[in-house]
Image (tube, rainbow, N blue to C red):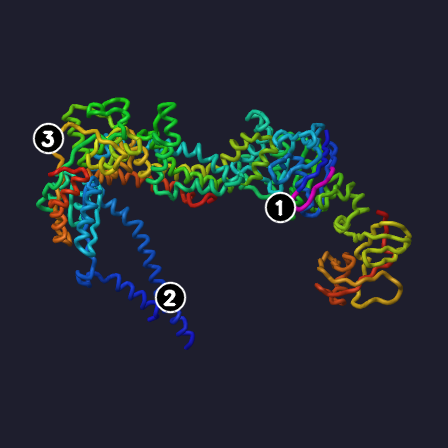
Amino acid sequence: MTAATEPRRRRAGERPVTALVGLALTAGIVLLVLPLLGLLARTPWSRILALLGEPALRETLRLSLLVSVASAALSLVLGVPLAWLLARVSFPGKRLLRALCVLPMVLPPVVGGVALLAAFGRRGLVGAPLERLTGITLPFTTAGVVLAVTFVSLPFLVVTVEAGFRGLDARIEEAAATLGASRWTVIRRVSLPMLAPSLAAGSALAWARALGEFGASITFAGNLGGSTRTVPLAVYLELHRDPDAAIVLSLVLLAVSVAILVGLRDRYLGVGR
Amino acid sequence: MSLVAEVTARYADFVLDARVEVDDGEVVALLGPNGAGKSSLLRIVAGLERRGDGRIGIEAGQVVIGGVTVDDVAAGVHVPAAERRVGMVFQDHLLFPHLDLTDNVAFGPRSRGTGRREARRVALDWLERVGLADRADVRPDALSGGQAQRVALARALAGDPAVLLLDEPLAALDVETRQEVRGLLRDHLRSFEGPVVLVTHDPLEALTLADRLVVLEDGRVSQSGTPAEVARRPRSSWVARLVGINLVHGVAAGTEVTVGATTLTTAEPVDGPVDVLFHPHAVALHRTRPGGSPRNTWRAVVDGMDVEGPRVRVHLDGPLPVVAEVTPAAVADLGLSEAVEVWAAVKAVELHVEPR
Amino acid sequence: MRPRHVLVLLAVATAACDGGASAADEPAVLTVFAAASLAEAFEDVAAELEHRHDGLEVRLNLAGSHTLAGQLLEGADGDVFASADDVEMARVVAAGRAADPQPFASNDLVIAVEPGNPKAVTSLADLARDDLVVVLPIGDVPAGRYAAAALERAGVEVAPASLEVDVRAALGKVVLGEADAAIVYASDVAAVGGRAQAVALPPDPAAGIRYPVAVVDAGRQPDLAAEFIELLFDDTGRDLLRRHGFGAP
């Protein structure tokens, strides 16, 4: 008799919990998937090709591609040494430096834009002397867009590549040294190739983030078709002008992002898989 | 060419202060308990322990490889590892996972300037010599532990080093593989023309591969000599235990030797500080204090037992930490096990006394 | 049922309840959609109305008229809509969300420059100079349309460094020093105090910058909405608008 009633009593207590968990799961999935489905539902499939053929749209896509690739390249150049420093060298104030490197990830992008103006704007710490001495200004230029989007996407690369460095066995580099490899040869033939997976993942993440940046870009670099109006800015404008165009652009960005995430095959979740 | 390393180095928990000399063609086994500084000494010779990075470094001394001074603290000389002609084999092989075997072995020659094709030719030659030429295109992760170590040896030798250093090369392998690789090692170490230093804590490895043993204990050389010399006359408890003998230090006055709080009676009169040596099978164990003829007896506590074939080695703790060898029947009769108290006894004639 | 479950149910039930209390107990909220350039002026008008009605909260939804119209077209809840031009108001009226718009204020275009006018900007023609960094409001917003029309009437072609999404953003660039000049409303320059200087333009009757206001149909506070609009037309309201740089309709 006891054997029959006990399990039932236990199950009765579990049911509300299971139901709540199930509810949370459903809600979570709905929250994530529904907006994407909604986008697909509103897509003007019949107009897509016509819209994608429009010169203004293509100009925007071309600019975004140029900016995001340039930004990813810049992130690589700046981020890899930084990641090496954080992974391999100990020095006073390291924790602060790491916090600063991650800061743009948690900062609202517009705030990032304001900060960039304070540094690189015409009256900025660096921008003012730069203009005075060379006549070069960064706001309102494509270079300015690259700077702004790199500011927000660099941390993604640094964090990923730092993990990659940590996964690198320093003793293998020692072995290479005993075989006669100079510091540079070790980096070139051992460290970098072994780092390749995390470099790829970090660059891809940084590139995707740069592609989608809005707040810092519009605040720092402004909004002009052909030079500073990237896809996210165009979507914002088109939303009230020609919603179909906005949706098509959004779809393009969405498709690209999904392709990257799938292509990375979970590597962005943590190096070493 | 030869190797001379005379160094003092400070570490977190001990100080390394040793001198090691190895002739061309000689194989020296660096032996000692864990933490004695063997690997550290090897790394110093390889140039991997940097000075001035805050943590560790050579405080004093010099390292000379093949007549070239690569380290001289007094003169401020430190040749970086990459510029020393050192070939090193590590316990974990440390092969480059992203290169195939040929590129791994060719790494040394290529780093030193040899062209790609020539380097690959040399590499394939060495892979042939270690019996893995048929797998030249695979990556290290496809190999077993033993195979990987063979490649590691080939990689170290392909660089044409002036000195060969091996840091516990067989420790990570299982017993059967160890035997296999040991054979290969012996052949290559014999044919290597320069000095060889082999770090190991396995006496069998030392005895089969080395021409000379150097024992490092607590950062200092406690003994140096051929395997036969060391086995015949161990100079520390650790070495003695290694060789299978009991050794205690004491002070002799005629046939009375004081070892700590215990007094032993020996058969040969000697004076001064001495080492007292006796075989484990000379130690008799009793549950109660033995009467009869005057013998050397003391109370001890069983600290552990190992079965070695038809004999059991009983480790004893007490005023004289020694090992006794008895039969399994005796173990049963005496009811021996951990923490059991016994009386140990050794006849005077079984005690060999050597001046220290 | 366990006590825990009862509490959860109670909480859910209470949250689901709405509108049960009478209007007198609930604090009233009036939502006003207003063009960004009306920000400071409407804050004062809102404060005046709140002063007259105890417990009233006036919420100002400030953005570009274009964005506001878009929101209303998407079905956003609002009680009053004050646009910076007739085009946006017409869109909202055509969609049936507002009726009977009336102009309540006018504005003038000016060129905003750094205090002291260091680059000596005196007219629209100067904006075509190579040495000036000029920003304009984008053509989607009323200010942008007015500016483009004014430039065309003056026969001036400008290559702007940026087309900002609302007129305050354009002014902001001048205040920050990133742009040398921007075409904005006189009221905008008034709003930033001494941080920018206005270069007046010759009076242009063809400009016709008028601000229409209307009650939003299906808003929940029609009486208060009507009162808010009346306030804009009486002496108090007119005084406030004038002080903020707006002209009579």
Chain holding disc 3:
C
Q: For the magenta stretch, what is the residue range?
A: B11-19
Q: CA distance from mark 2 to mark 1?
A: 50 Å
In terms of image quadrants, where is residue A6?
bottom left
From the viewer's perspective, is the residue at label 3 or at label 2 nearer?
Answer: 3
Give the percent coordinates (x, y) of residue B261.
81, 58
- In the picture, the disc for residue B172 is 1
Which one is nearer the viewer's eye here, B158 or B51?
B51
Q: Is residue B13 magenta?
A: yes
Residue kind at label 3, given as amino acid type: Pro
Point out the residue furthest to the bottom here. Answer: A1
Instruction: Say if residue B310 shows up in the picture.
Output: no
Task: Examine the rendered structure and indicate whether residue A181 appears above or below residue C222.
Answer: above
Give the percent coordinates (x, y) of residue A49.
22, 35
Cβ–Cβ below 8 Å for labels 2 and 1?
A: no
- In the picture, the disc for residue C205 is 3
In the image: residue B38, left or right of residue B144 = right
Q: Residues within 10 Å of mark 2 (few under 14, many from 20)?
A: few
Q: CA distance from mark 3 to mark 2?
A: 76 Å
Instruction: Say if residue C228 shows up in the picture.
Output: yes
Cβ–Cβ below 8 Å for labels 3 and 2?
A: no
In the image: residue B54, left or right of residue C211 = right
Reading the image, the residue beneath label 2 is A14
Chain holding disc 1:
B
